[in-house]
Image (cartoon, grey):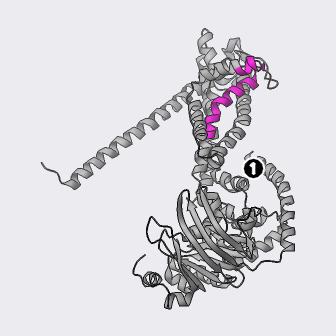
């Protein structure tokens, strides 16, 4: 009975979605696929009365990997969540300053976070596949956008799994439950799921921290491959990882607990790691703290 | 004799183990004895006629068919009303309600509703549904009364089940551009379904076995026909047991125990079915 009820409501909501989807299509056609460049100007974040990040100004270049590094609690993840407005969901979080994606202010009144999140995907720290089949996991985003045609979904699912370097391992078992996959496979499934809405930007919050070294390697290879088509912003506490996979590195630091975190330095990864401008960056990357 | 720290720890461990084991065995033993005894006393009264015939000779002979059907009707009516309302209430409390004094008040009210004695629900049902709303003594009035009693169980179970679902899963759906409603409907609710179903089965099992709420709201001593709609009065298994024992001289022991057995067996079968389905689903949850 529950499933019957469920399909009935799905049918009703599908009708509502399809009209919303037509609106989205129009926008997609009139504005050419953006390149995925973020510009942050004086971005500050406050949890209630406490300012946790202050005055971050930086650019995130398109089709490149930007790594956010810094000690635990320095606001890396919070800053990341500004980019797809996931902070909106946490309540009591206030973001000020401007954040522009391809020149458009994403915090402007008319911007629906739902539309933004289809352009800016996210992969979380721990693999969090939905409790459903591999296929349904990847198809979730497209279905949310109103895509219902089977052949269209099939194509998206295959393409997304290929891009996440998981296709060869699962192509014969798309109906299998996502929880039957290993941790590393689950995380690549989550990457495929995020890619399925064809985002211009992919946010990754320590995507390999819960994985073994081999799975980590596979994720890093995937990132290296993906950056040709997608802008990637990755939070990592692993400096070797940042050095290996990123083109640009941003170092954040909260110097005292009663002070907000700040962006200490941002620049080309090789330069930040070999010849940083700021002594605090050097102290951190040489392992003197953090 | 002085015992070392380790020896003492080992003795404490053994004592704790024994105490806990005894407590568990007691609970299982009492429940098992109850079920076995009901089966032992009840099975002799069972027959095809018992299940399909109407009561005769004031219930001393014949069967319990109208009572069985009446209970199924009322439980079905209660389910139809309770399940959607209870789930919606639970979803609201878990996913939508702000952290405010009014939300705390709602939660407190739900908890208190669960603690109200069932005879009070019976009186309330008589006053509100039978008399004030003018529904009269009927399947509908009894279902509405049982709904009031069952609702807090389902609301609480739903809310608790939803809370068990990791926030990460919700965020994953939201980050894919799903609305809050779609997130709840397609990800959170299905993941929480096992816990919700448990709550529903528990609530409806209690509704099936209650006498007090249907006492004044529609149950009758004897009917030779089945209820013909929600406006009809009805017989019910628990009420049948109650009236047999209290108002029929020389009541037929076998038939009354048989009625009890059927009631317990029906409820247990529903619980068992839910448990099987749940264990099948649970294999799928990693958190």
Toward the left, the furthest residue is B1
Q: Main secondary structure of the magenta part?
A: helix
Q: Is residue B146 magenta?
A: yes
- Name which residue lies at 58% across and 17% down: B253
Q: Is residue B69 above or below residue A8?
A: above
x and y percentages locating residue A159 in the rendered image: 75, 77
Q: Is residue B114 above or below residue A102?
A: above
Stretch in magenta: B128-155
Q: Is residue A270 above or below residue A14?
A: below
Residue B51 horizontal side relative to residue B28, left or right: right
Looking at the rendered image, the quarter that the C terminus of chain A falls into is bottom left
Q: Is residue A3 magenta?
A: no
Residue A152 horizontal side relative to residue A132, left or right: right
Residue B194 horizontal side relative to residue B55, left or right: left
The answer to whether residue B202 is seen in the rendering is: no
| Quadrant of res B235 | top right
Number of marks in picture: 1
Specify the subunit that label 1 lies on.
A
- Name which residue lies at 73% across and 57% down: B179
Q: Nearer the viewer, residue B176 or B253?
A: B176
The residue wearing badge 1 is A3
x and y percentages locating residue B35 in the rendered image: 53, 32
- Name which residue lies at 37% across and 39% down: B22
Tell me the SS state at disc 1. helix
Looking at the rendered image, the quarter that the N terminus of chain A falls into is top right
- Name which residue lies at 73% across and 27% down: B69
| Quadrant of res A187 | bottom right
x and y percentages locating residue A102 in the rendered image: 74, 77
């Amino acid at each position: 009975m529950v499933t019957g009820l469920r399909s009935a409501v799905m049918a009703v909501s599908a009708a509502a979605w399809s009209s919303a989807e037509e609106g989205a299509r129009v926008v997609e056609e009139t504005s050419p696929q953006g390149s995925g460049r973020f510009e942050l100007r004086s971005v500050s974040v406050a949890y209630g009365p406490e300012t946790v990040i202050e005055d971050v100004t930086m650019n995130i270049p398109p089709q490149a990997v930007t790594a956010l590094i810094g000690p635990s609690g320095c606001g890396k993840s919070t800053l990341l969540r500004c980019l797809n407005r996931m902070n909106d969901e946490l309540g009591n979080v206030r973001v000020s300053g401007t954040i522009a994606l391809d020149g458009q202010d994403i915090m402007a009144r008319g911007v629906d976070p739902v539309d933004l999140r289809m352009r800016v995907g996210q992969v979380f720290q721990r693999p969090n596949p939905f409790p459903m089949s591999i296929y349904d996991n990847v198809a979730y985003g497209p279905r949310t956008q109103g895509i219902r045609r089977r052949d269209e979904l099939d194509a998206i699912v295959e393409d997304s799994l290929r891009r996440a370097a998981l296709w060869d391992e699962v192509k014969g078992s798309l109906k299998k439950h996502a929880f039957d996959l290993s941790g590393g496979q689950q995380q690549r499934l989550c990457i495929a799921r995020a890619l399925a809405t064809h985002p211009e930007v992919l946010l990754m919050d320590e995507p390999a921290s819960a994985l073994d070294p081999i799975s980590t390697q596979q994720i890093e290879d995937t990132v290296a491959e993906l950056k040709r088509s997608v802008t990637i912003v990755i939070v990592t506490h692993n400096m070797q990882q940042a050095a290996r996979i990123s083109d640009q590195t941003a170092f954040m630091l909260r110097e005292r607990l009663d002070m907000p975190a700040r962006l200490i330095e941002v620049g080309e990864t090789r330069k930040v790691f070999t010849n940083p401008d700021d002594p605090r960056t050097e102290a951190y990357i040489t392992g003197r703290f953090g | 004799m002085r015992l070392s720290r380790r020896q003492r720890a080992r003795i404490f461990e053994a004592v704790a183990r024994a105490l806990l084991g005894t407590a568990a065995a007691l609970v299982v033993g009492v429940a098992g004895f109850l079920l076995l005894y009901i089966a032992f006393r009840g099975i002799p009264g069972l027959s095809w006629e018992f299940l399909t015939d109407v009561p005769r000779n004031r219930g001393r002979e014949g069967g319990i068919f109208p009572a069985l059907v009446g209970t199924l009707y009322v439980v079905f009516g209660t389910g139809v009303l309770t399940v959607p309302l209870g789930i919606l209430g639970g979803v609201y409390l878990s996913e939508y309600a702000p952290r405010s004094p009014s939300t705390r008040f709602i939660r407190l009210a739900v908890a208190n509703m669960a603690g109200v004695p069932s005879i009070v629900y019976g009186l309330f049902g008589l006053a509100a549904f039978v008399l004030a709303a003018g529904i009269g003594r009927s399947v509908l009035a009894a279902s509405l009364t049982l709904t009031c009693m069952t609702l807090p169980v389902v609301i609480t179970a739903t809310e608790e089940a939803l809370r068990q679902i990791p926030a990460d899963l919700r965020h994953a759906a939201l980050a894919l551009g799903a609305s809050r409603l779609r997130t709840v409907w397609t990800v959170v609710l299905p993941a929480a379904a096992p816990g919700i179903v448990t709550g529903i089965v528990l609530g409806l099992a209690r509704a099936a076995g209650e006498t007090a709420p249907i006492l004044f709201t529609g149950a009758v001593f004897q009917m030779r026909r089945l209820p013909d709609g929600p406006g009809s009065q009805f017989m019910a298994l628990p009420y049948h047991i109650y009236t047999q024992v209290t108002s029929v001289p020389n009541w037929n022991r076998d038939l009354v125990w048989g009625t009890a057995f059927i009631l317990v067996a029906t409820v247990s079968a529903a619980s068992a079915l839910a448990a099987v389905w749940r264990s099948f689903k649970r294999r799928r949850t990693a958190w």
